[in-house]
Image (tube, grey):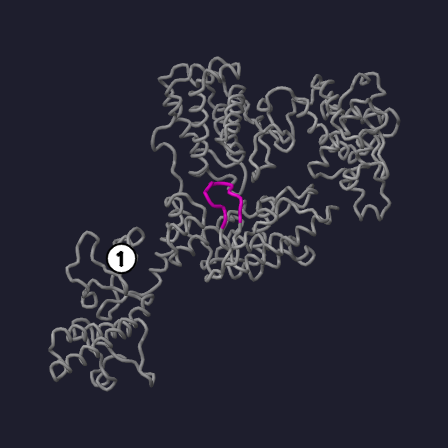
Amino acid sequence: MTGPVPYRPRRTAQSDPRLGLDGLFDAKINAQLAGGLPPDARQTYFTRATMPARWLEAVLENQPSYRARDKSVAIDLRGLPPSMVTELAWSIERQVQLGMRIQAQNTTKLTRQIALVLIDPAYARLSSLTDLPHEEWLRAIRKARARLGEPLAANQVTIIGRVLTRAVDLLVHVYHCGPWWELDVWNPLLDTRIPLREHEPKRHNLIYFSHLTTPWLRGAAKWWLSRQLERGVYTWSTAFTRQVNLSWFQRYLDAVGCDGPHLLDDQRRLGRWVQDFRQWLHQQRCTAGANKGATLGQIQRRAAMTGLEQLYRFLFEEREEAADALGEPRWRRLGPQHAVLFRYGDKPTGPKAPPPDAVLSDAAISRIAEHSGLLAQPKTEGGFADEQLVRIVGLLIKAGRRISEITLLDFDPIIAVPFPDPDGHVARLRYQQTKIITDDSTILIDQETLDLVREQQEYAQSFMAGQNRSGVDPKYLFLAERNNRNGDRPYPQVTARPRLAAFAAAIDLRDDQGHLIKISKTHTFRHTKATSLLNAGVPLHVAMRYMGHKTPAMFLHYAQTLATTAEQEFLRYKKVTADGRAYDRDPGEMFEALALDQRTDRVLPNGYCTLPPRQVCDKGNACLSCTKFVTDDTFTDVLQQQREETAKLIDRRQHAHAQRFGQPMTDDNVWLRGRTEEVAALDGVLLAIDRVRYRDGTTTAVRGAGAPQRRLSPDTAEHTGEDT
């Protein structure tokens, strides 16, 4: 068994550090790059007059603020070998295509320093920017300048180093001839071989494998994720999450070691070894994020176990191909036990419902909307200078979509509706399905939501004009502000969340208990929208379609939140029995006993039935004369309506009885006595709930439990000494 090794954090390079080594350059590929350059890019010296127009639009020094200071836009590639001229010209062309900015002056500075380096006989053989690692290039530049007696300032070395890094990061992926998945850094922006869906929320997230320090694990992870990406089983977002999950298994290997890909030579001990990993996770703490230092939660532990489980299940099924592709014959030693590393129930299930604070109150929503203008105010005035985020928040509130679905909206996501909608809907909003793929990716929207979209479209067109691209519609409605000349980079979610957290603190956004609300968890807006649909009585299938869920189980995740909210509302109101007395049991026990969060057969039109769920009612509809009947203020309107309708029913039946028999029903009539008792019971309940008053402002009194249920006049109440 290999011994434990210390854990080493991942690197943050934009390309695989191994690619910047001697031998990567390929003269044939370099010639292809030269042949693929447009004719106007095949020069060694570019001025404002000779530079391609598309380059000039991208040059930073061509922006109005720089032109006012007479900054030169010239790019000088002279003094370099033809192969390097090709590399730099191609990298500039590629950066322009990607919508990046070109720093003309710093590019020229870089080429002049490289030309100085090549004068040294020790470096005269170099023919490519990839012939030296980044650090070696900078050392050679500092050495060449020192030889001239003109050392470069540290900040200047850093600046030209960034220009060099961007060019090399593009080139190494072009020169790399092996399978793309062999690289330790996957960068879909620079490596076009990586499968990627058109609208990928994590498009600009790189996947690093250098943190998987065990060679066989790193190779297996890369091969597994690449196969799943190419087959369309995983999206880039899923692959990104899976490699992060495997870092916990790597740390476990560092701590206890193992015998290789098959984990243990003695397979009889495999179950115990895997269970030790499960227990080890309980002792680990988060290393980053808001929960840094806290023990791993159920979700994190489940993700770590799921990533490992899926890796080994895949490798067991394709162990022969894996052994050949990875050059590691020990993968053939996997058995069926590796496909089921964890038993049923081993993985924590995580919370079954969002926390109660996942739903924003109406007061919180109103406060957010009222102060949202702060997001757009200049920073000098205490704002956040982010006009786009104002409208993003507006759409989160109105539409209830995921933030990725909002930030990835097309520039023109509006679809006209062919006929007027009586509910006020004026159009459909088309959104990108980033998590769950359903048959329809549109929702109905009202005029206010449509206005938000139109305002953002005006902003986006203005943004493109500022990029020297007037008249060009961007790909997305909400746009990243940097390196986005083409308008094909959406507003980054990593920008929105910290700003929303700071915004909530700035406006002192708190819940009913005085706790600060974290709207940086933008899914809170989605929970709130789903709960509002449930509260409004929207049919389940309609609400499911609106929220983009495929199964009732997905949507009822929000219904559990509603149940918590319902319990809170249930406990707010004082409960009253049929005879007008206060209900003497604990309302919380009543809620739990009746299982009102799971069933509705004890919820009556005008109150609740406290008969235990396993007992059957034999009283028919005589609830108002039943000792098991309980109601509260939320049913006041229904109770008042019921009283009015019962009184009218008595009048109609008395009139009909008089017409048929010549006299009205007497007080001892069975039917009349029942209805009169209902009216009296309703009067008592309403009095206890709402303090029903006469026109002169005095209140009526109600007899206690066991007394005949009829209302008393004020005079009678005064003589009997009862409280009014």
With respect to residue 637, does 442 lie above or below?
Answer: above
Q: Which residue is mark 1?
A: 590
Q: Classify the position of the C terminus by image quarter.
A: bottom left
Q: Which residues are magenta?
A: 430-442
- Helix, strand or loop at label 1? It is helix
Is residue 490 on the magenta stretch?
A: no
Q: Is residue 91 left or right of residue 341?
A: right
The local crowd at label 1, few if under 14, some if 14 to 19, many if 20 or more residues have their Cα within 10 Å, is: some
Question: Which residue occupies the extreme right position in the image?
Answer: 148
Quadrant hosting residue 627: bottom left
Horizontal and vertical percent position of residue 689: 30, 71
Q: Is residue 257 left or right of residue 181?
A: left
Q: Is residue 264 left or right of residue 675?
A: right
Q: Is residue 626 left or right of residue 330?
A: left
With respect to residue 58, does 503 lie above or below?
Answer: below
Question: Which residue occupies the extreme top position in the image?
Answer: 329
Horizontal and vertical percent position of residue 14: 65, 31
Which residue: 37% across, 48% down?
556
Q: Amino acid at mark 1?
A: Met
